[in-house]
Amino acid sequence: MEPVSKFIRDEPAEAAPGVARIDVDAVSSKEARSLYATRQPIYPKRARGTFRTIKWAVMAVTLGIYYLLPWIRWERGPGLPDQAFLLDFAHQRLFFGPIEIWPQELTFITGILIVSALGLFLVTSLAGRMWCGYTCPQTVWTDLMIAVERFWQGDRNARMRLDTSPWTFEKVWKKTATHVTWLLIGVATGGVFVFYFRDAPTLAGELMTGEAPAVAYVFMGIFTTTTYLLGGIAREQVCIYMCPWPRIQAAMFDADSLLVSYRGYRGEPRGPHKKGEAWVNRGDCIDCKACVAVCPMGIDIRDGAQLECIQCALCIDACDDIMAKVGRPTGLVAYETFRNVHVASDSERQPARFVRPRTVLYSVLIALVLGIMGWAWMMRSAVEISVIEDRNPLFVRLSDGGIRNGYTLKILNKTHGAQRFSVRTDGLPASALAIVGHENGNSEITVEADVVRALKVYVTVASAAKTALTGDSTPMSFVVTDLATGDQVIRDTSFRSPEP
């Protein structure tokens, strides 16, 4: 590892009058990328500007949602959880406000994941790794950890000096305060995570008194550790080496994708600008390296598109600030399309095209999946049935020559009140239905709220009616009728018999 002192200069040279040239090198680049290289520390300088403000706002919103969502209440009625968002594994349901999803309806979760993936593809094709730069959990928590580090240890130069200084009392307490705060954030993150799986106030009290289930402490510990290590220690290493998305994203880009880019036609040739020097025959870049100093990934945006760049746009804020100080137009580093990165002058730039085949395709697919999910949700029934045929034996030949099949009929009542049902067969002439436990002729079935009731059912075809059977498998259906509303749910199956 290069000593931190290498990157500190007591009297930095001026890149322009009143603008210091920051002595910093890009530690993340294609040439430096290696699984076997010792990690060089990155000390991102605090940035100020439009994109930094946006990132603060996104951080506040995303962390606020994560930490506060389990505490929001939603009244659903007696005997039901009042937590607005709850992954109720114990009762095999997912609650989100008025929405209740059962295990049999996990296709909706699949649809949500598909829409999320397509949305990520769409955003990437339009504006590069905007997800990575603003809303990825790794980015959000790393930003938070860096803010904590800056609070206790100071900005870039102060942190670098602290790391190279002897272990004094000041260094010990500042480092201790930083890591303790990181651990507390990890504990809060892990604690909130387990709140999504059980009533938050109840579980919080149990965690404090030591009465919570062991699995809650295990997962809380796992998330505490991973938050501390990934957000506080590993940081950019997660994005560069652990995350597959930087290597997949290239398939989503095209010539009109917007990426944070350095406009070389404006900046080159770069170099320090002296007082009174004209701006003709030279570029606007004064080689101050402010863009490198603020980068949390440790790259130089002037080197072009790079796997390590998360498109956080902090280099835009840093460069715009410098351009304002030297009296040059902003936008030397800006969101730019691939098509315009290598143009020779501003007059050759072409406007970005947001409507193009790739973005239209992603948008149509998102609309299609959402439409299918909406239709499926409107058509969903409050009652579901499943039929499992007996496999051993497939059928039983009775002493009177008749044929009997056995089935397990499961009725799921997704309402919050007991329901009464009747069961009959359809499509099988001259058949008799018998339900175990209802031999007295009463075929009314009561299913309590929010439960699945399994029934053992036998269907018999008399010897005289066997001529109506078609081969060794005759199609038939079970019809379950809600006695209160008259609504019916039909499930197709088959009746097995010997070959004619």
Image (cartoon, rainbow, N blue to C red):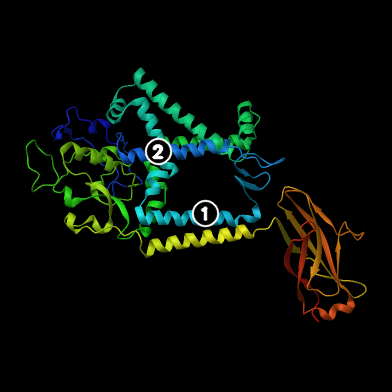
Residue at figure coordinates x 17%, y 31% from the top left: 12
Q: Is residue 110 above or below residue 324?
A: below
**C-beta proximity under 8 Å, tags 2 and 1:** no
Percent position of residue 477, x then y: 76, 69
Residue at figure coordinates x 55%, y 56% from the top left: 110
Crowding at label 2, few (<14), some or many (≥20) Cα neighbours within 10 Å?
few
Q: CA distance from mark 2 to mark 1?
A: 25 Å
Q: Nearer the viewer, mark 2 or mark 1?
A: 2
The kind of secondary structure element at disc 2 is helix
Most foreground residue, 143 or 4: 143
Task: Classify residue 97 as left or right of residue 124.
Answer: right
- Kindly indicate the quadrant of the structure image that contains residue 204: top right
- Kindly indicate the quadrant of the structure image that contains residue 105: bottom right
The kind of secondary structure element at disc 1 is helix
Q: Mark yes or no: residue 443 visible.
A: yes
Q: Is residue 346 above or below residue 190?
A: below
| Picture quarter with the C terminus | bottom right
Residue on which the image places disc 1: 113
Q: Is residue 481 above or below residue 4?
A: below
Residue at figure coordinates x 28%, y 44% from the top left: 299
Residue at figure coordinates x 30%, y 60% from the top left: 255
Q: Mark yes or no: residue 38 visible.
A: no
Residue on which the image places disc 2: 57
- Kindly indicate the quadrant of the structure image that contains residue 249: bottom left
Most foreground residue, 336 or 485: 485
